Image: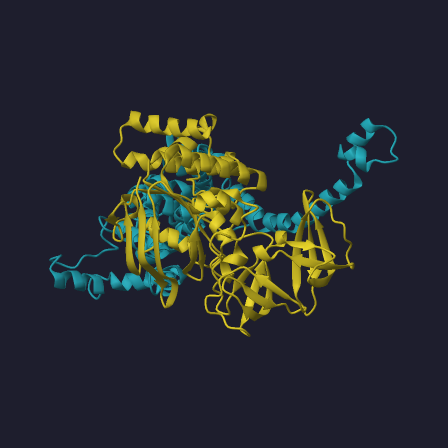
Chain colours: A yellow, B cyan
C-alpha cells in the first residue's frame, strides 16, 4: 500500500520529448486509469513508474520514497503486461513462483502464496499447464496471479484486456475491479478503451501528446470536460461540436447564434467572452432530440439500430454532421428531413483555445439524469 | 465426410469413402511431380556415389586400374590370413584417426558453442556500431578454409610466425614452438583455428534464435527482480535450446568430416590425421581404392550413428520442453 506522486516528470527519447512534465498525485489504495489516444504517452508514463524506462527529469515518489534511481524490483510494484509476458517454457506454477524464488522466501511460503493466488483467480486446476495450453483469458489471469504473489504496494496494468475478446474483456474487467476491492492496493491502469476507464477508475487521467488534459472522477470528466479534447475523447458516440458566434452575454448565460440561424441561450458563466467571439458548442448525442420545433434542420444520412437505442447521423448542411441517440427503434428513414432540438441545459461552450466555459454553480449540466454526480462532487 | 459431400451422384456411400476423390488424386499427382526432380538429382549426386563407394569397399580396386578388380567381400574391413587378423578394423592408424576426429569434434564444437553464445548475446544487445560488428564478426567464416589455414600456417610458423614472435617478446615462451608439428600442440592448434573460423557461424545461428525471443518476458523478469545470470540460465537458454541443438548438429557434422583445415595446417601428420585425411591417404597416396572406400564407408556409418544418437537425445529433451 502506497501513494504514488509524480512531480514534473519528463521523458525524452533522444531529441523526441514524449512526456512534457506531468504532475500527479495518486492516493494510497486508489484505482487510477490513464487513458488517451495511441501515442499520447500513457504507456510510457506507466513504464516510467515501473522503472522500465529512466525518468529524464522530475521526481517520482512511491510511498513517500524517491524511487527515480531504484531498480524496478525495489520499487514495490508488480506489472501486468498486455501480451501477458509469461515464460513460455514454464508451467503456470513456475511462472508465478519464478519471481519469488529470488526473494529468498522459503519453499513453503512460496507454495502457500502461489496456491492462494491461484485459488483467488480460480486457476488451481491449471497449475501444471504450459502457457500455450491456456486460453487468452486464462493466460491473463496467470499474469495477474504472478503480480499478486509479489504482494506489491502498487499494481501496474498495461492494457491488460486488449488481447481478449469482448465477452472475456467484460468478465476480466469485473475480476480486476474485485481484486481492487479485495486487496485495496493502489492500482494504475493504462487503456485506450474509455469503457474500461469509466467502469474501473476512481479517477481518470486523460493524456494527450505527453500532457495531462484533465484528472477527475469518471462522471466529472463526462459531465464537466475541461476542454474540447476531453469532451471529444470521453463518451461514445462522440460529442457533437457546432461552431458558433457569441450573440450576447448575460450574467450567468451566453447567447450563441447557430450557423443554421436562430440563437440558443447556454447556461454557462461567460468568464470574459465577448459578443462576436467564435466559440464551439458541444452537446452529447443523447441530448439532441428530433422535434417538430427543433432549431437545427437536416437530412438523415445513416441510421444505426442498436436494439435498446438507435443512432441517427444527420447532415446539418455545410459539412456539419450531428449524431442523435434516441431510445428504441428508429422512426426515421435515410433521406428523410428532420429538425433537431438541442437541450440547452446540457450544452457546453468552449473557447477558441479549447478551454471550457465554467458551468453555472448548482445547475451542473446533467442534474436530471445523474443523481450520483451530486455525491461524487460533494 | 468430405467424400459424402464430394460424391454427389456416386451410388453407395461406402464405395465413395473407399475411393479418393479426383481432387485428392490430382493433388497427390502434383506433389509427386514437384518432388520428382529433387529425387532424381539426389539419386544422381548422392545415392550413386555412395552406392559406388560402398561397392568398391568390397573389392580390391586400385586407382591405376579402376576397371580391373575382384570382389573380395569383407577383406578390406577384416580378414584372417594364417591366423593373423588384418584389415581396416585392426589398423591402429585408422583408429587413431577416428579418435582424433571425435576428440577434435567434441572439443571444438564445445568451445564454439560457448563462445558463440557469448558473441551472440553481445551482438543481441543494443550498442552503437552493432550493425558493423555483426558484419565484421562474419569475416573469418567468409574466408575459404584453405586460405585461412594457409594464413594461420604462416602466423604459427616456428621461425617467421608472428605468434611465436609475440609470445617471445612478451616473455611467455623461452623458445619458438613448432605449433603444427609438435604432437603436444598440433591438434590443439587445429582446434584453435577451427574455433576462430566457425564461431561466427554458431554466433549467427544463436543470434537468430535470440531475436525470436519475446522482449516482454525480460521486462517481466526485470520487474520481478530476477538476476540477469539467472534469467539467462532459466529463461534464455531453455528457449533457444532447440535452435542451439540444430547449430550443434550442423557443426558436429562438419567437424566429423573435417579435411581441408587439417590437411593444409599439418599435412599427413599421424598426430592430427582425421578420418577423412586417412581415407584420402589410402585412396590417393597409396592408390588403394578398395581400402579407401572401406574407410569412407566406415566414416559414413560412424557419422550416421553419432547423428542418430544426437537427434534421439535431442528429441527426448525437446519432448520435455513443449514451447
Residue in the foreground of this view, choosing between A374 and B25:
A374
Percent position (x, y) of residue B207? 40, 53
Question: Number of callouts in the render?
Answer: 0
Residue at image position (57%, 51%) is B45
Task: For the C terminus of chain A, give its image quadrant.
Answer: top left
Percent position (x, y) of residue A88? 44, 39
Residue in the foreground of this view, choosing between A224 and B126:
A224
Percent position (x, y) of residue A133? 51, 34
Residue in the foreground of this view, choosing between A51 and A233:
A233
Task: For the N terminus of chain A, give its image quadrant.
Answer: top left
Q: Is residue B287 left or right of residue A309?
A: left
Q: Is residue A211 left or right of residue A196?
A: left
Percent position (x, y) of residue A233? 53, 56
Q: Residue furthest front?
A: A251
Q: Is residue A270 left or right of residue B190?
A: right
Residue in the foreground of this view, choosing between B79 and B194:
B194
Quadrant in the picture for residue B161: bottom left
Residue A144, can we see it? yes
Residue at image position (88%, 35%) is B9
Decide: is B150 above or below B255. Answer: below
Quadrant in the picture for residue B23: top right
Decide: is A167 above or below B45. Answer: above
Quadrant in the picture for residue A183: top left
Residue B96, can we see it? no
Amino acid at each position: 500500500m502506497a501513494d504514488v506522486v509524480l512531480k514534473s516528470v519528463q521523458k525524452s527519447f533522444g531529441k523526441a520529448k514524449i512526456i512534457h512534465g506531468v504532475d500527479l498525485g495518486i492516493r494510497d489504495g486508489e484505482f487510477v486509469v490513464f487513458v488517451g489516444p495511441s501515442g499520447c504517452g500513457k504507456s510510457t508514463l506507466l513504464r516510467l513508474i515501473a522503472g522500465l524506462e529512466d525518468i529524464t527529469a522530475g521526481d517520482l515518489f512511491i510511498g513517500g520514497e524517491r524511487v527515480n534511481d531504484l531498480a524496478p524490483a525495489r520499487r514495490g510494484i508488480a506489472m501486468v503486461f498486455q501480451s501477458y509476458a509469461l515464460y513460455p517454457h514454464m508451467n503456470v506454477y513456475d511462472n508465478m513462483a519464478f519471481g519469488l524464488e529470488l526473494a529468498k522466501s522459503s519453499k513453503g511460503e512460496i507454495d502457500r502464496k502461489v496456491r492462494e493466488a491461484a485459488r483467488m483467480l480460480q486457476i488451481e486446476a491449471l497449475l501444471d499447464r504450459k502457457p500455450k495450453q491456456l486460453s487468452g483469458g486464462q493466460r491473463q489471469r496467470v499474469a495477474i496471479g504472478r503480480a499478486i504473489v509479489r504482494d506489491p504496494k502498487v499494481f501496474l496494468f498495461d492494457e491488460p484486456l486488449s488481447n481478449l475478446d469482448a465477452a472475456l474483456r467484460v468478465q476480466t474487467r469485473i475480476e480486476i475491479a474485485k481484486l481492487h476491492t479485495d486487496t485495496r492496493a493502489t492500482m494504475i491502469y493504462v487503456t485506450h478503451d474509455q469503457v474500461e476507464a469509466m467502469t474501473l477508475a476512481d479517477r481518470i487521467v486523460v493524456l494527450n501528446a505527453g500532457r495531462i488534459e484533465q484528472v477527475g472522477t469518471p462522471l466529472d470528466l463526462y459531465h464537466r470536460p475541461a476542454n474540447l479534447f476531453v469532451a471529444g475523447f470521453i463518451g461514445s458516440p462522440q460529442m457533437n461540436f457546432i461552431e458558433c458566434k457569441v450573440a450576447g452575454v448575460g450574467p450567468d448565460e451566453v447567447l450563441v447564434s447557430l450557423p443554421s440561424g436562430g440563437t440558443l441561450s447556454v447556461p454557462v458563466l461567460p468568464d470574459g467572452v465577448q459578443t462576436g467571439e467564435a466559440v464551439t458548442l458541444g452537446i452529447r448525442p443523447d441530448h439532441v432530440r428530433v422535434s417538430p420545433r427543433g432549431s437545427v434542420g437536416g437530412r438523415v444520412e445513416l441510421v444505426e439500430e442498436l436494439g435498446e437505442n438507435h443512432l441517427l447521423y444527420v447532415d446539418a448542411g455545410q459539412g456539419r454532421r450531428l449524431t442523435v441517440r434516441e431510445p428504441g427503434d428508429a422512426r426515421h428513414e435515410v433521406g428523410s428531413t428532420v429538425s433537431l432540438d438541442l437541450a440547452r441545459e446540457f450544452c457546453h461552450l468552449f473557447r477558441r483555445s479549447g478551454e471550457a466555459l465554467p458551468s453555472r454553480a448548482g445547475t451542473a449540466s446533467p442534474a436530471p439524469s445523474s443523481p450520483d454526480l451530486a455525491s461524487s462532487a460533494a | 465426410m468430405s467424400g459424402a459431400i464430394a460424391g454427389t451422384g456416386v451410388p453407395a456411400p461406402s464405395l465413395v469413402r473407399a475411393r479418393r476423390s479426383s481432387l485428392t488424386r490430382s493433388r497427390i499427382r502434383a506433389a509427386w511431380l514437384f518432388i520428382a526432380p529433387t529425387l532424381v538429382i539426389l539419386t544422381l549426386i548422392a545415392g550413386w556415389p555412395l552406392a559406388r563407394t560402398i561397392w568398391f569397399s568390397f573389392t580390391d580396386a586400385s586407382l591405376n586400374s579402376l576397371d580391373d578388380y575382384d570382389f573380395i567381400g569383407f577383406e578390406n574391413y577384416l580378414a584372417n590370413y594364417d591366423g593373423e587378423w588384418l584389415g581396416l578394423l585392426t589398423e591402429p592408424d585408422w583408429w587413431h584417426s577416428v579418435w582424433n576426429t571425435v576428440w577434435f569434434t567434441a572439443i571444438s564444437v564445445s568451445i564454439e558453442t560457448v563462445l558463440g553464445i557469448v558473441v551472440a548475446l553481445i551482438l543481441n544487445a543494443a550498442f552503437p556500431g552493432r550493425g558493423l560488428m555483426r558484419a565484421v564478426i562474419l569475416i573469418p567464416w567468409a574466408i575459404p578454409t584453405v586460405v585461412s589455414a594457409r594464413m594461420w600456417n604462416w602466423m604459427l610458423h616456428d621461425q617467421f610466425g608472428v605468434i611465436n614472435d609475440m609470445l617471445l617478446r612478451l616473455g611467455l615462451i623461452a623458445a619458438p614452438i613448432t605449433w603444427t608439428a609438435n604432437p603436444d600442440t598440433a591438434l590443439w592448434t587445429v582446434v584453435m583455428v577451427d574455433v576462430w573460423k566457425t564461431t561466427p557461424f554458431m554466433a549467427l545461428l544463436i543470434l537468430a534464435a535470440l531475436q525470436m525471443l519475446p522482449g516482454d518476458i525480460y521486462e517481466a523478469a526485470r520487474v520481478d527482480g530476477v538476476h540477469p545470470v539467472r534469467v539467462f540460465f532459466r529463461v534464455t537458454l531453455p528457449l533457444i535450446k532447440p535452435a542451439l541443438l540444430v547449430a550443434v548438429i550442423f557443426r558436429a557434422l562438419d567437424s566429423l568430416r573435417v579435411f581441408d583445415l587439417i590437411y593444409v595446417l599439418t599435412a599427413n601428420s599421424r598426430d592430427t590425421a582425421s578420418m577423412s585425411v586417412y581415407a584420402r591417404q589410402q585412396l590417393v597416396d597409396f592408390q588403394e581404392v578398395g581400402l579407401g572406400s572401406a574407410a569412407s564407408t566406415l566414416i559414413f556409418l560412424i557419422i550416421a550413428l553419432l547423428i542418430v544418437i544426437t537427434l534421439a537425445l535431442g528429441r527426448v529433451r525437446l519432448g520435455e520442453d513443449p514451447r
